[in-house]
Amino acid sequence: MALGEIRNARGERFDYAFAPGATGRRGVVVIGHGVTSHKDRPWLVALGDALREAGIASLRFSFAGNGASEGRYEDATIHKEVDDLGSVLDALADLDPIYAGHSMGGAVGVLRAALDERLRALVSLAGMVHVREFMQVHFGHLRPGRDVMLGKPHCPLTQAFLDDALAIGSVLEPAARVRVPWLIVHGTADEIVPLRDSRDVHAAAGGRAELLELEGVDHRFTGHEGAMAAAVVRWLEGVLASEAPGT
């Protein structure tokens, strides 16, 4: 199956990797990355590989301005990435899309799932929840327009990015409006996004989400990429089986 170019509302082309699923199997998992990242990080590739082996279609993509996608990093904000995800879902609307987002991509997923009924399920991987707090801890000492994020020269911090994140505050309120099956995965040794974020959003979901804590695992699932991916695939297979015709 060929998807062709996928662009956002600004006309910026996304860099993506698509792997089709088994013949006749519905559902495609869209995999989104975190802040200053891209589609080819090891933990996202591991998830895509595990999905392919299970016969589940997947599409890893880089948000505009990140990786090899078109656009300027300076224009990136969380809400712009929510819109970017919407553009990807436009291209996949007939394939029963599911979204799996890592770190800031997890916050993007909650915001999108709270307003977009096309999503069939949601997976949050070490997802950012307390957005304002995250920005204050990691970027509060930086000067917008002069300093870069996480030491990456191609990722300048902008006032627009900060203003957007501060306006969001947290994703707890939209989390209460997510109605699709939802898996939350977080390592207990996460050094970037506190485990408390996932515990808090799990509580906000009011029993509609499942929380999986991976003991001793860091933010990037280092050395545990396969275990994370296997857990996600197992959960997704249950979701897809429960929603299959005749069940």
Image: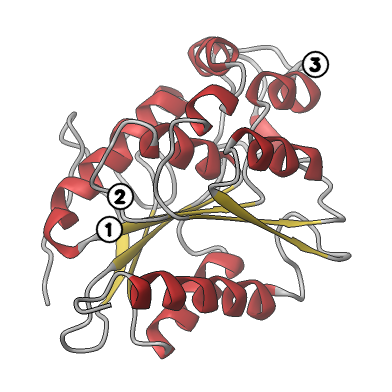
Going from N to C along the chain, the mark reached first, 3 or 1, is 1
Residue drawn at x 68%, y 27% is 130
Q: Quadrant of residue 128?
A: top right
Q: CA distance from mark 3 to mark 1?
A: 38 Å
The amino acid marked with disc number 3 is: His
Q: Which mark is residue 119?
A: 2
Residue 70 percent coordinates (x, y): 29, 42
Q: Quadrant of the C terminus?
A: bottom left
The mark closer to the camera, 3 or 1, is 1
Residue drawn at x 87%, y 55% is 189
Q: CA distance from mark 2 to mark 1?
A: 5 Å
Residue drawn at x 31%, y 60% is 16
Residue 35 percent coordinates (x, y): 57, 39
Q: Tell me the crowding category of disc 2: few under 14, some 14 to 19, or many 20 or more residues within 10 angstroms, Cα based.
A: many
The mark closer to the camera, 2 or 3, is 2
Residue 71 percent coordinates (x, y): 31, 35
What element does badge 3 sit on? loop
Q: Which residue is mark 1?
A: 97
**As displayed, is residue 221 above or below residue 136?**
below
Cβ–Cβ under 8 Å for marks 2 and 1 = yes
Q: Which residue is mark 3?
A: 141
Q: Quadrant of residue 136?
A: top right
Q: Tell me the crowding category of disc 1: few under 14, some 14 to 19, or many 20 or more residues within 10 angstroms, Cα based.
A: many
Residue 1 percent coordinates (x, y): 12, 77
Going from N to C along the chain, the mark reached first, 2 or 3, is 2
Judge from the rendering whether residue 186 lies leftward or rightward of residue 75; answer left or right.
right
Residue closest to the eye, 241 or 214? 241
The amino acid marked with disc number 2 is: Leu
Going from N to C along the chain, the mark reached first, 2 or 1, is 1
The amino acid marked with disc number 1 is: Pro
